[in-house]
Image: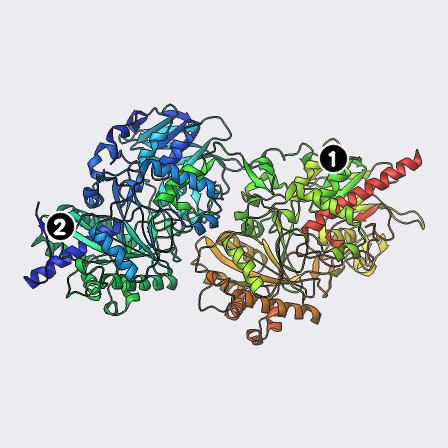
Amino acid sequence: MKQEVFSFRTKPRQSYIRMGFHIFLTIFVTIFIFHGSCNCDKGHYTFMKDATLAPTYASFDYILIGGGTSGCALAATLSQNARVLVLERGGSPYDNPTASDLGNFANTLFNITPNSWSQLFISEDGVYNTRARVLGGGSVINAGFYTRAGDDYVEEVEWEREAVEAAYEWVEKKLVFEPHVMGWQTAFKDGLLEAGVNPYNGFTYDHIYGTKIGGTIFDGAGHRHTAANLLEYANPDNIVVYLHASVQKILFTKTDGPRPEAYQVIFEDTKGVLHKVELANNPMNEVILSAGAIGSPHLLMLSGVGPMAHLAAHGVKPVILDHPMVGQGMGDNPMSPIFIPSPTPEEMSLVQAVGITKFDSYIEGGNNVTLSFDLTRRFFDGVLHVLNETSRTTSTKILTQPIVDFLRSLDRGFKDMIAVNGMFQKVAGPASRGYMELRNRNPDDNPSVTFNYYQEPEDLNKCVEGLKTIIKVIDSKAFTKYKYPDVTARVLLNFMLGLPTNLRPRHVTSMFNLKQFCIDNVMTVWHYHGGCQVGKVVDKNYKVLGIDALRVIDGSTFLKSPGTNPQATVMMLGRKFLKRGRPSSNIRKKHETINRDEPRLNRFYGFMKNATSAPTYARFDYIVIGGGTSGCSLAATLSQNASVLVLERGGSPYDNPRATDIENFANTLLNITPNSWSQPFISEDGVYNTRARVLGGDSVLNAGFYSRAEEYYVKEAEWEMEEVEAAYEWVERKLVFEPQVTGWQSALKDGLLEAGVLPYNGFTFKHIIGTKIGGSTFDSAGHKHSAADLLEYANPDKIAVYLHATVHKILFTTKGNQRPKAYGMIYQDADGMFHKVELAENAMNEVILSAGALGSPQLLMLSGVGPRAHLEAQGVDPVVIDHPMVGQGMGDNPMNSVIVPSPQPVELSLPQVVGITRFGNFIEGFSGLSLSYNLTRMFFETRLSTQSITSFINSSDFQLNLIEIDGVIFQKVDGPFSRGYLELRNTNPDDNPSVTFNYYQEPEDLEKCVKGLETTIEVINSNAFSKYKYLNATGRELLNRMLGLPTNLRPRHVTSVFNLRQFCIDTVMSVWHYHGGCQVGRVVDKDYKVLGIDALRVIDGSTFLKSPGTNPQATVMMLGRYMGQKILRERNASGEKRD
């Protein structure tokens, strides 16, 4: 077969035409060269069949969708101890084994006929791409380069290093070889070293800065070994692989209560027959998506898991779960190649040497790769066909005429094979991110994908540095043998501007501006990833957030592409993650374990009922009003030795357990529909706030941060230190976890230390000056554990919990001049029926208010205990006691926040790190939060309709269904000194009272805020945090942007732009730590008994003189336990005296 060899010295015009074709074909070789001898007899597995032979119904322990790079490794591993079905949409690589040999690499990629292994798609950026449809996935059609992820990558994703090492070795034993490096690749290696990509690290699988030789999945004879070969490890009695099985959707069980659970998959064979396969009956069985970065998010959406508005617009029914992050975070390492005609004959090689630069660009190359002109033409005919089919979405972004013109020019001179050589740089990371959307509901069609190549300047700078390095390599002495002496690297670079390397427009400035060249000539290196990212769509165990029995294990979960080429890590992941069998637990602290489904299965307490089922009259030893953060711990404790009734005005957190998962934090808080768990109120200061109406109280809604009170706080409250310690530990055993601190939160920690919030105190529950990691009520799977879980400690025979029970008033005996005594109360159920409950006959029995800082003072007033003049003015009758301090001393820790957009992907995290300053200020933050646009709009429209809010909502209409917040850092003021008051609006207990907190009324609070903001600015501007903010964005500029957001209803002043005191006042927000209204020494005594009234206590945050610790929930739960034990001791002592 004739091969064209280019020479500058003869027939200049024809030579340049031929050079154009050489370069053009090299471009397409390099597109595919990084998309990552088989023993053909071994590959014809007896368990591998065409899907047309499948039964119409079957059941398995594990159903794997996708027999690709990760799916084969995963299936082989799982089959050792379970029955596994693999559904692969493509065919077998063993049907045409020579097609995957080294010599046919390029032609196999260019073959995009309907049943080929390579399916063409074009991103919305106008860049050609392909996806594999064959058993073994991308490992069957890539360039075979094998290199592991960097140590820092393994550390960031929190994989166990020993398990990772063993999994890599398991892959390598079957597939990987040391390449034989010859002339061209040796010259390329030496050119990299001459260009400064040092040191030389020799042959290694490790990802190390410098120049190295990596592994290859081509053996010495040029035969490819793929992920499909890993199925040789499988137990043939426990595995079935169906080929040409196109999965249509995953089916879920779903009711109004429990989380959706995957249980069935529907797939179609090539004859159009539909088949059903279900999970066998075992709670550990799962459906696992391993369909790749395009296929996995695509199938989730088609199955009703994704952004609700988008799915509904495409007619996907039913929408199982509104999962806004599915399809988000799509990334692809952008690549820029240069073709280098050679005057010297060379060996054929794909990638063997790589230069790993310190500026995050990888330099690789391949040479003497042969391509068929006919297949090249067919490839571009396919491109034009795709463009016609998708003109609705791509016509404004692409240029098709250059393709037509180029093909016409090729018709005049090329019919044979041609050999090409090239080098290319590819950007590590990248920081630029895009998204994926459905085009239609056909799973065989490609979805719409946008990668936003070079959207972020960091990526563009890496490209420029990479191209500069390639130019140095081409012009190096080491490489002189393999390029024509009169052709410079820059000439070769500019020549490529005339070739249809993509469908993007060309700019004249590309000829002298490398940044514009990168943008105009960007190509893919086939390392696309994202769409089901860890922390956003799946948890760290790769379980889909909010859904049971469903995981995603493939490159779609990656936050960035690992190593220089991802295939090694994708195969390793399939082996590593489930190699120990059938996991059932997550780490809790250090030694304890929790069952993931524990809160869903065993917490539908038998003693918990709707108030509509309550008798109209009952008697108990203790009546606890409010099953909130303190009420649950108090009731569980009291039930050990007395009969207890808990009246909770809200519902159960177990009715919708996924609503408390970390990814739903913001949306649950924003859901202020009438029966939701979050009741909005706006203080008279013009600040938005909410109060909980759910069993477990604010511990169900809050951000989960857990930190104890200061030691001096305990002393001032005159609590007994040993008993306080024991009560905290009682809570912590049930609810509290050590968080896994990763990227963004780790940078916040280091930024705080750099800003001088010292020392570093590590992980601790204690309140200590400096920077620390606190506890969390979210477990490692992202499930919230709330005060409601403390009811597991209760004696089920001595406790009743009534839900949706609205207490209207407490009843008192008032005889003559005797002190009033509480003896019962009236409450109303959801049907409007009234019920009466009284204390049983015992002098020690009591009514205990635990309704929170708003509910407790409000109910006291509605029951006739409060300022007489105010109660009479509101029509409260009778006034039982004139108690002027009820409702006074209301405080709320003011907060001011800064949104920090990030150029890097961030993990989903709520507060884990806190900086406790010496000037009475706490610095915290969260990242990766996603808010439903519809809920956000409803939140604002339900509360108010001012012009500023309306304008904000209208300006945000482009946010179709999701508002993403990369990072937020906020300061909150300790104390505070400023105090306000609570008053009734009416006598309806369901309505919010009027509350005034008087934020920043006292200058001490304002000074703390200013210092807190100054510290926040230092953190944002710190070197440690630089990765998570844009280069040109300063802390002060970000602060000023907050002035345009409707953070509250207060007026804005021009002076806020340069005066931090005014900024504090204008942008103040609540951090939901309000307290007071029934303060110790003013409304209750030190035993929390209401002054002037018998048999009535208040035990909750309304009694606090100031908020304890950085976050009060730990102390509120502790107080319920602490006081419960104290009350029982008093009860026991009273009984002994009577005896």
SS class, disc 2: strand
Vertical placement of 265 versus 860: above or below?
above
- Residue at image location 76% in from the left, 36% down from the top: 639
SS class, disc 1: strand
Image coordinates of residue 560 in percent, x first then y, are 40, 51
Residue placed most toward the observer, 1128 or 457: 457
Relative side of 627 to 522, left or right: right
Relative side of 910 to 215, left or right: right
Image coordinates of residue 972 in percent, x first then y, are 63, 62
Please state which of the two labelled residues, at mark 2 or mark 1, is closer to the viewer: 2
Q: Quadrant of the N terminus?
A: top left
Q: Which residue is mark 1?
A: 799
Residue 319 showing in the rendered view: no
Quadrant of residue 12 in the image?
Answer: bottom left
Mark 1: few/some/many CA within 10 Å (<14, 14-19, 20+): many
Residue placed most toward the observer, 589 or 672: 589
Quadrant of residue 102 in the image?
Answer: top left
Tag 1: amino acid: Ile
Relative side of 171 to 160, left or right: left
Quadrant of residue 73 in the image?
Answer: top left
Image coordinates of residue 156 in percent, x first then y, are 47, 50
Residue placed most toward the observer, 577 or 629: 577
Image coordinates of residue 1011 in percent, x first then y, are 63, 69
Numbered disc total: 2
Q: Residue furthest right?
A: 817
Residue placed most toward the observer, 1027 or 532: 1027
Q: Which residue is mark 2?
A: 418
Mark 2: few/some/many CA within 10 Å (<14, 14-19, 20+): many
Q: Name the N-terminal-most of marks 2 and 1.
A: 2
Tell me which colouring the rendered structure shows.
Answer: rainbow
Tag 2: amino acid: Ile
